[in-house]
Image: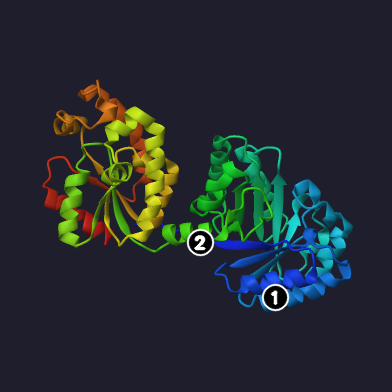
């Protein structure tokens, strides 16, 4: 059956400099549907002795929202102003006070006193504003937080290319596979890292930091955009998404499923053609395959706004891991299979298969199918063979396994 993915919490920052403005911001945030509020102490321009009482007032004003208190060093992206405060002393005071729900502790400055038992949980954090660590280094840092007794591990880094965001997301997924019960928070910063903030939860990150107005870190996404995206992805809708090689029968079987289940039918290729106002072959010719794949990825979010549907996916939809994780969060992913010879017979007269232009033969189809097979199999929550079977028989088996 489909994979259940937990909706990440949304955390918004308080970065006001003075007590009154800090408390006013908290009153404003109390009315938001955010889950957490982070008070960034390094932005505070008042006296250190006032900090514990502000924490108490914040906790009262924020009501049911969780409060995270952070004193970020300048080396890890904090304000120079924060250097006025004694780091270890402040952490000790806040832990003794035991009012905040979470305290951020930089792993490179983590004092021994944080090992004591408490209500307040520790987030062991590491930030790198110069580069994205290698995959194994990311996992090592998050594992260090776990081994040193932190309740949550957190890592944020600055990418210089989109590929580095993918490195962070893969490392996040591997860490969750290794330690499924250990909470982690990861993100790539800056504009390039936007997809990690929007979709990191699909890989296992438990919190995404948004902003209301000015952000506290590079690349923070407005709270409303985060909420809108999460409402779509984690909508609880249970779609049945059909994947597989072109010509495997997705469109035909989708129509039969629509009839048998009384669900709406969504064809992703047709949806993109309507949105773009042109045929897929024309999109490929004018913009290239990469552009088309980006439209596929964006389209999946819209499924969260629709009734539970039968979704017929384009042949390349499952080639992107992001697509797969989104589809799995939204329901069952059904892989339809057929032999290359069967595929050839079904598509040989088609004029809207750009990838097969000039390669309409069994050998090429077989080679391409083999390249895609590992991606399809990894994506599938259900696999159905279609060779030599009636459409109604296939559709009934899908409904038996998915509903």
Q: How is the image coloured?
A: rainbow
Q: Is residue 189 above or below residue 61?
A: above
- Disc 1 on helix, strand or loop? helix
Q: CA distance from mark 1 to mark 2?
A: 23 Å
The residue at 56%/39% (across/down) is: 167
The residue at 54%/69% (across/down) is: 33
Q: Quadrant of residue 364?
A: top left
| Nearer the camera: disc 1 or disc 2 | 2
Apparent side of residue 296 relative to residue 163 in the rendered image (left or right): left
Q: Is residue 355 above or below residue 149?
A: above
Specify whether residue 293 is in view: yes
Q: In the displayed image of the protein, which residue is found farthest to the front?
A: 277
Apparent side of residue 360 relative to residue 233 in the rendered image (left or right): left
Q: Quadrant of residue 84?
A: bottom right
Q: Position of residue 148 (x, y in %)?
A: 73, 55
Q: Quadrant of the C terminus?
A: bottom left
Q: Nearer the viewer, residue 49 or 338?
A: 49
Which residue has dot 1 on it?
59
Crowding around mark 1 (Cα neighbors within 10 Å: few <14, some 14 to 19, many 20+) is many
Which residue has dot 2 on it?
227
Q: Position of residue 391 (x, y in %)?
A: 13, 48
Q: Are marks 1 and 2 in contact (CB under 8 Å)?
A: no
Q: In the displayed image of the protein, which residue is found farthest to the top?
A: 358
Q: Quadrant of the N terminus?
A: bottom left
- Disc 2 on helix, strand or loop? helix
Crowding around mark 2 (Cα neighbors within 10 Å: few <14, some 14 to 19, many 20+) is some
Q: Position of residue 78 (x, y in %)?
A: 77, 52
Q: Position of residue 295 (x, y in %)?
A: 38, 42
């Amino acid at each position: 059956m489909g994979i259940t993915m937990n909706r990440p919490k949304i955390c918004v920052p308080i970065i006001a400099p003075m007590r009154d403005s800090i408390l006013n911001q908290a009153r404003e945030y109390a009315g938001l549907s955010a889950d957490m509020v982070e008070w960034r102490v390094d932005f505070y321009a008042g006296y250190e002795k006032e900090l514990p009482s502000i924490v108490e007032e914040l906790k009262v004003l924020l009501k049911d929202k969780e409060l995270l208190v952070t004193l970020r060093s300048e080396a890890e992206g904090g304000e120079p102003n924060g250097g006025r405060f004694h780091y270890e002393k402040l952490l000790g005071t806040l832990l003794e006070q035991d009012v905040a729900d979470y305290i951020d502790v930089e792993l490179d400055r983590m004092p021994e006193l944080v090992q004591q038992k408490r209500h307040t949980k520790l987030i062991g954090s590491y930030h790198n504003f110069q580069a994205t660590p290698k995959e194994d280094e990311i996992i090592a840092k998050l594992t260090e937080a776990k081994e040193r007794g932190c309740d949550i591990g957190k890592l944020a880094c600055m990418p210089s290319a989109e590929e580095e965001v993918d490195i962070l997301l893969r490392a996040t997924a591997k860490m969750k596979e290794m330690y499924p019960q250990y909470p982690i928070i990861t993100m790539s910063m800056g504009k390039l890292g936007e997809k990690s903030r929007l979709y990191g939860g699909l890989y296992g990150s438990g919190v995404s930091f948004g902003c209301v107005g000015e952000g506290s870190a590079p690349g923070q996404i407005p709270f409303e955009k985060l909420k809108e995206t999460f409402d779509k992805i984690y909508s609880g809708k249970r779609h049945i998404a059909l994947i597989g090689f072109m010509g495997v029968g997705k469109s035909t079987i989708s129509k039969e499923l629509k009839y048998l289940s009384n669900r709406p039918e969504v064809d992703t290729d047709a949806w993109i053609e309507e949105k773009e106002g042109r045929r897929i072959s024309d999109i490929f010719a004018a913009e290239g395959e990469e552009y088309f794949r980006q439209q596929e990825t964006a389209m999946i979010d819209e499924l969260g706004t629709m009734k539970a549907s039968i979704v017929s996916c384009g042949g390349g939809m499952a080639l992107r891991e992001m697509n797969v994780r989104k589809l799995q969060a939204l329901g069952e992913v059904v892989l339809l299979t057929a032999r290359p010879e069967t595929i050839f017979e079904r598509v040989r007269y088609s004029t809207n298969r750009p990838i097969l232009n000039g390669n309409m033969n069994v050998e090429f189809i077989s080679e391409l199918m083999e390249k895609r097979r590992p991606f399809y199999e990894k994506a599938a929550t259900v696999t159905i063979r279609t060779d030599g079977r009636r459409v109604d028989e296939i559709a009934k088996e899908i409904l038996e396994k998915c509903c």
